[in-house]
Image (cartoon, rainbow, N blue to C red):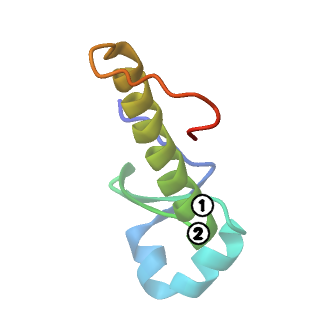
Amino acid sequence: MTQILANYTTSISELKKSPSSVIENAAGEAVAILNHNKPSAYILSPEMFEHLLEMAEENMFLKEVAKRYGDRENVVDVTLDEL
């Protein structure tokens, strides 16, 4: 069984008939587009898409920080005055 990861759903047929009303009715929430009752795509508001990109970038940054934190060979000692 495929999980639907949105509170709102619509069919591809309904999306073709009235894409503006689908987006408007979602009120900024994600919409799962269903094909034969299975999700085939998701529509996201620009704000939600930007938020997801920011979260992905932050996650990549945190992974890099953790990786570098574990790399003690390249540690350079500096004083606060040198910063």
SS type, badge 2 = loop
Looking at the image, residue 11 lies above or below residue 36: below
> Which quadrant holds residue 1?
top left
Looking at the image, residue 51 lies above or below residue 22: above
Say whether residue 34 is left or right of residue 30: left
Q: Position of residue 45 (x, y in %)?
A: 59, 69
Quadrant holding the C terminus: top right
Q: Residue at x 40, y 29 (%)?
A: 63
Residue type pointed to by label 1: Met
Q: Position of residue 28 (x, y in %)?
A: 68, 66
Looking at the image, residue 18 lies above or below residue 47: below
> Which quadrant holds residue 51?
bottom right
SS type, badge 1 = helix
Q: Position of residue 66 (x, y in %)?
A: 42, 22
Q: For this rendering, which residue is in front, 55 or 23?
A: 55
- Mark 2, residue position: 45
Residues at badges 1 and 2 in contact (C-beta under 8 Å)? yes
Q: Residue at x 45, y 48 (%)?
A: 57
Residue type pointed to by label 2: Ser
Q: Which mark is residue 21?
A: none
Q: For this rendering, which residue is in front, 34 or 26?
A: 26
- Mark 1, residue position: 48
**Alpha-carbon span between mark 1 and mark 2:** 5 Å
Instruction: Point out the residue furthest to the left here.
Output: 73
Q: Residue at x 53, y 46 (%)?
A: 55
Q: 10 Å neighbourhood of mark 1: few (<14), some, or many (≥20)?
A: some
Instruction: Point out the residue furthest to the front here.
Output: 81
Q: Residue at x 72, y 69 (%)?
A: 27
Q: Position of residue 19 (x, y in %)?
A: 51, 83
